[in-house]
Image (cartoon, rainbow, N blue to C red):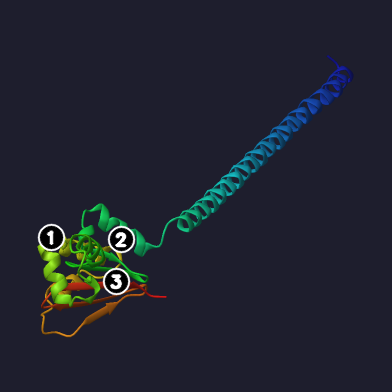
Amino acid sequence: MNNTEEKLTNTAEEPLTNITQNSSVDHEDNDIAAGNDEEKHKEKKKFTVKKKLAIIGAGIIAYAAITSAYIAFLLPPKIERVQDGIIRNAYDDTLKRTDEGFLLSQYAKTEEAKESLEKSLGDVDIDSLDDDVLYDLMRLANCYCHEPEEHLLPAIKYANKELGFDDSLYDKIVSTETSMNPQSEKNDKYSVEWINDTEVGLTVLYKQID
């Protein structure tokens, strides 16, 4: 092959080589662009999922808060629920409800006893009786808690715990001597007053603090 033919052959091959190289570069660029688009799509998808989860989480928290507030609105005050708990635990013979709270005593059922005594002692003015006479009649009529260890003391312990008092309060109450003056203690929401009387034993009064 002479020089002229070689030059023609080389000249004809050069465009094909350039086209092939350019095509490879274009494919690489397209692959990079496609990869970038895919990464962007993944990131966008992750962001969308996170956003949805955040919205769902906020909804759950809001629902829980609304539900708790609604339940709290429907429920009776704590001090009333404690009284209901005393009744459920069969300590109701020690319980007397008051306007501000409740009282626990062996002789808590004085009003019920008076009604019963009025029926059986129709000609006696029960309200005119001295307390010691009334308590004697209550004992005779079995209208009192004659087993304080079984009812009164567990009721006191239950009330203290439910109303947020320390366990040491129970020890203070049960160790109170009849010679002591009335005792009292309180926390942020409730107060408790008690006395150990020679006639009626322990009397404990719980009140809600306004």
How many numbered dots are placed on residues in this image? 3
Residue 201 visible in the current orientation: no
Position of residue 151 measured from the top left corner of the image (x, y, whole percent): 16, 60
- Number of residues whose C-alpha sits closer than 10 Å to that of mark 1, classed few (under 14), some (14–19) or many (20 or more): few
Which of the image's four quarters has the C terminus?
Answer: bottom left
Determine whether 67 is above or below 48 in the image: below
Task: Report, in whole angstroms, how far the alpha carbon at label 2 lies from the one at label 1.
Answer: 22 Å
Determine whether 40 is above or below 14 in the image: below
Query: What is the quadrant of residue 20 in the picture?
Result: top right
Type of residue at label 2? Gln
Q: Which residue is mark 1?
A: 142
Could you tell me which secondary element the residue under label 2 belongs to?
A: helix
Front residue (pair 58, 2):
58
Front residue (pair 105, 188):
105
Query: What is the quadrant of residue 125 in the picture?
Result: bottom left
Q: Which residue is mark 3?
A: 206
Type of residue at label 3? Tyr
- Number of residues whose C-alpha sits closer than 10 Å to that of mark 2, classed few (under 14), some (14–19) or many (20 or more): many
Task: Report, in whole angstroms, how far the alpha carbon at label 3 lies from the one at label 1.
Answer: 25 Å
Q: Which residue is mark 2?
A: 83
- Number of residues whose C-alpha sits closer than 10 Å to that of mark 3, classed few (under 14), some (14–19) or many (20 or more): many
- Tell whether 16 sits left or right of 58: right
- Tell whether 150 sits left or right of 98: left
Checking the image for residue 85, the label placed there is none
Which of the image's four quarters has the N terminus?
Answer: top right
Type of residue at label 1? Asn
